[in-house]
Amino acid sequence: MEITVGHTPDSDDAFMFYAMLTGKVTSPHFKVNHVVEDIETLNKRALNHELDVTAVSAHACAYIRDYTILRSGGSFGKGYGPIVISKQNLSPDQLRRSKIAIPGKMTSAFLLLQLMIGKFDYVEMKFSDIPDAVLRGDVDAGLVIHETQITYEQNKLVKIMDAGEWWRNHTGGLPVPLGVNVMSNHFGPDTIKQFDAFFKESIVYGMARIGDALDYAMQYSRGQPRDLIEKFVRMYVNDITIEMGILGEHATRSLFQFGIEKGLISEFDLRFA
């Protein structure tokens, strides 16, 4: 069966798919054609049901239909997550009155920041452009994801808010649900479980051969050194990535419940493999 699989041009996603896309692990059931797009583009493509399997923001699951969340491949932060950066310290009240660059309206980072400070003035842009926009003064602050969470100090920017810390303090330590992978419901539950097992095997293979998987992931390093990419990958490829389990599912449902309570999203019906 030939299927289209979307993932982001990010080192953690590449790490997860390394074994699958290089033939290190194979499946008698699937031939994979992979598509690489930034996360907000994949979110929008999922809205239109364009891909069979795709990475999406956890937040995007509030809007997409007819997909099942896979139990493998999730990005969950353990005490860390998206951060807000600026050229100077801003109080929460100042931040609420600021113009903030965000990496997309369907990103989990955007939902988390709204949970933290309420609604605010924002401008959408590609996530990798946000630090430069803050430096130029195009915006007062930036909501950053991916490796920019750990490189902002290189540009002499300061962290003024941390979604990971906020989430940990408000949930009693649940992991932060940021990204998941979903598969079209038209395949049926048995086929979805087969692909989920295939994907899990790819992740386990990469984690057992970190050096080789990192070599592959470095094609998406965006010029960052290998030690930084390894740090980033280890942050977001963990035991919950292999299998989200009850903890990951509970964290995802909690994110949506918070969103409903704050009037940021409507009722939802999450389907897990």
Image (cartoon, helix red, strand yellow):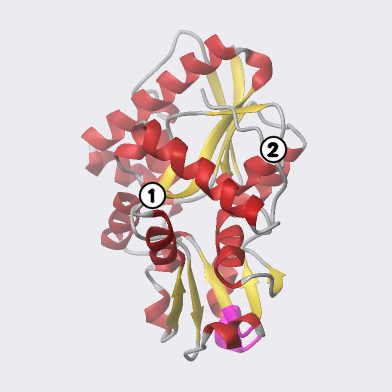
| In front of the other: 105 or 259 | 259
Coordinates of residue 84 in the picture (x, y in percent): 50, 74
> Which residue is identified by label 2?
46
Where residue 28 appears, as percent x and y from the top left, is 45, 8
Q: Residue at x 67, y 30 (%)?
A: 51
**Camera-nearest residue between 138 and 161:** 161
**Residue at the bottom extreme of this rendering:** 88
Q: Residue furthest front?
A: 261
Q: Is residue 96 magenta?
A: no
Residue 18 shows up from this direction:
no
Q: Nearer the viewer, residue 65 or 210?
A: 65
For marks 1 and 2, give the CA distance: 24 Å
What is the secondary structure assignment of the residue under circle 2?
A: helix
Q: Is the residue 240 above or below the residue 170 in the image?
A: above
Which one is earlier in the sequence, the residue at label 1 or at label 2?
A: 2
Question: Percent x, y for residue 216?
Answer: 36, 42
Q: Nearer the viewer, residue 84 or 94?
A: 94
Q: 37 above or below 48?
A: below
Tell me: residue 140, above or below residue 74: below
- Identify the magenta region: 133-141
Q: Residue at x 42, y 76 (%)?
A: 152
Q: Which residue is at a point 57% across and 75% down the rendered structure image? A: 142
> Is residue 137 covered in magenta?
yes
Secondary structure under tag 1 reads loop
Structural crowding at the residue carrying mark 1, measured as other residues with C-alpha within 10 Å and reported as few (<14), some (14–19) or many (≥20)? many
Residue that label 1 marks: 175
Task: Name the residue type under label 1.
Answer: Pro
Which residue is outermost to the right? 48
Picture quadrant where residue 126 is located: bottom right
